[in-house]
Image (tube, rainbow, N blue to C red):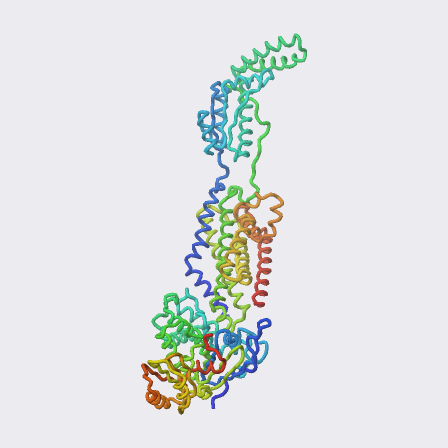
Amino acid sequence: MPSVLLSVTNLVKNYGTRRAVDGVSFRVLAGQTLGLLGPNGAGKSTIVGMLCGLLAPDGGDIVLGGERVTPGAAAVKRKIGVVPQDLALYDDLSALENLKLFGALYGLRGKLLMERVDKVLGQVNLADRARDKPATFSGGMKRRLNIAAALMHDPQLLILDEPTVGVDPQSRNAIFDTLEALQAQGKALIYTSHYMEEVERLADHIVIIDHGKVLADESPASLHSRLAAQAALRVELAEPAHAALLDGLRSQRGVTSINADGGALDIGLAQAADALPVMGWLQQAGCRPLHFATARTSLEDIFLNLTGRTLRD
Amino acid sequence: MTAFFALIRKDLILFLSDRRALVISLALPIVIAAFFGSLFGGTAKTSAIDVALVQQDTSEIGNRIAAGLKADPNLHITPLALAEAEKAVRKGDQKVAIVLPAGFGEAAGAALFGGGRKPSIPLLYDPSQPAVLAMVKGMLTQQVMSVVSAEMFGGKMGQAMTERSLHQLDEQAKTDPDSRALRDMLASVQKYQALPAKDGAAAGPSKGLSMPFTTADQQLSSGIAEQGYNAYAHAFAGMGVQFILFMGIDMGIGILLARRSGVWNRLLAAPVSLTQVLLARAASGAIIAFALLCVVFAVAVFGFGVHIASLPGFIGMALCFGVLTASLGLVIAAFGKTPEAARKIAMFAILVMVMLGGAWMPSFLFPQWMQTLTMAVPTRWAIDGLDAITWRGMDAVAAAPAMGVQLGFALVFGLLAVWKFKRA
């Protein structure tokens, strides 16, 4: 059983009379990737700010490797790497100079500093652009350099705050490759995002936040099991579905929900294997499907189920 | 300390890689100071006043007055016809035009002994040059008195005039006993006119009346009397201060941009304190300001003949001004809400400060009340301090109050900035 690396207990943060974070608790195990999910304004960035020691909590505790994280706690800050949501780089310094600066802030110098620069540039595939300025980089390359800067001091915990905002799919994959390599090295990650598919791909534990409170703190499998429907079947019929057809469909085995919009049916299924019998029944009922597709239920559905709204609201 | 020096190093690299900042902070003050310096007289001790002379009196006296004016080193005389002179003054090409009217010499001689009406010399002048008019009047009076009295006491015209005046006074004495005294004086003048030239002395016109004193002008503003006032010294001080403060604005705006971009959070997420980050930024700002002032004055010394009387004094002043600039940058960053708004407000504030500090026009030209009031402006101390160790020729001790006041302002600004940053 991996040890607990980070322990967040009953964290509270107020902005004036507004409570931005309200009694948040969760843990991160060594080598674990925690997905911190929530819509804009849910309190994710405030939590990240407190985890990094940028903000002082109004209540609760953050303990990393046995030490409390506070704005003045220099020693514990050395164990944390931060990848801010914004590109926190100096555009007029070369990639090399940026990394040297952020390494030096953590006390690295001389040969060790240069070794770390070479290593992280290799990790993010930017070794051949070391002497170029970020101003000349693509969006994806800047994002990778943004991650590299956080890796300079070889932190135990890497906190990534929406690291793929504004990145094209190819660059996003490159970032994922980098992060998966870090996972393979045993680094613990906290990954905040409102892109479900990213969190599903990377996280082995998920904390869902809304209005500053934890709504769920579980593994992806456990979250999925909360839903009656584990799979979704979308069918487009040539004719609009009438009431008798929908009643008949509801009585079929494995059907957990139906959402009809004219001829388009979104059918929730207990499991993916229920899709074939449902399609057979529709055919027997005289329906002419123009198109159909199945999908696994997503974290988006889970979030909708938990909060009644989508993540991008 | 590794982090502290890394932050300073980063700022120096960023500044040197920013061509715009370099041009604004270095080239512009030099160019504008050179312009203002030459405008206010450069290194020349005095410049001759441009005066047009319309000589309508071609008598002996008229010719000698014209020659005397032309020989005066304080005047640059251009002989012109009346219409040309009027046109030149109206256009501002000539500051004053002296019109010596026909018959002036004879009329002036007659008036000297009280027997005739005083002739008038029209002076045409540019309304923007009232001070020059007063100076020209003084020099003209001296010339006229000297030439007319010389002619009256020794020239042919004077002898004829004396003869005629004696005849008139003899007639007047019959009815006016008081005129006898004047007649006796003129009789003595006639005897003086009849004396032969002294042994060895060349025959020629008498010297006439002249100022009964001379002045011994001695410059006390500078430790090196031969150097004198150098308008470039003040111009380089003023423009150096102004444009380096603009660099201070850029420094403050840079912090605001870093806060907006997330770089600031990344810095503070590292094991360095807010105070360390602010101190490092202040240190780099002060180093840049110090270096810029040194380069600006190096150009002033080698290119424009500015003399630095005390090198330790200059280094002290430049260091203190650097610290003041950096602290001002921190205040801008601390109290600025957005980079855009902060730049506008800071630019306005700096322009007012440098204007009141005497950067554009020396503070000794201010009215007395304003000279007193502007002592509360830190730029006044910066510029006065630089003036002290350049053209005033003073030493580091004399500039020490200016250094101390700048450091005092810097301390207040720095504490205000740290207080505001910690509250944010």
Q: Position of residue A312 (x, y in %)?
A: 45, 75
Q: Position of residue B382 (x, y in %)?
A: 55, 52
Q: Is residue B423 above or below residue B318?
A: below
Q: Position of residue B115 (x, y in %)?
A: 59, 15
The one of A268 and A198 positioned closer to us in this rendering: A268
Q: Is residue B264 above or below residue A307?
A: above
Using the rendered image of the protein, determine whether residue B2 is visible from the camera's viewpoint. Answer: no
Q: Quadrant of the C terminus of chain B?
A: bottom right
Which residue in the rendered view is the most extreme toward the right? B177
The residue depicted at 50 percent of the width and 24 percent of the height is B99
Q: Is residue A13 above or below residue B299?
A: below
Q: Position of residue A211 (x, y in %)?
A: 53, 77
| Residue B47 placement, left or right of B406 | left
The one of B232 and A262 positioned closer to us in this rendering: A262
Which residue in the rendered view is the most extreme toward the bottom? A253
| Residue B220 placement, left or right of A95 | right
Q: How many marks?
A: 0
Instruction: Kindly indicate the quadrant of the structure image that contains residue A237.
Output: bottom left
The one of B392 and B170 positioned closer to us in this rendering: B170
Using the rendered image of the protein, determine whether residue A6 is visible from the camera's viewpoint. Answer: yes
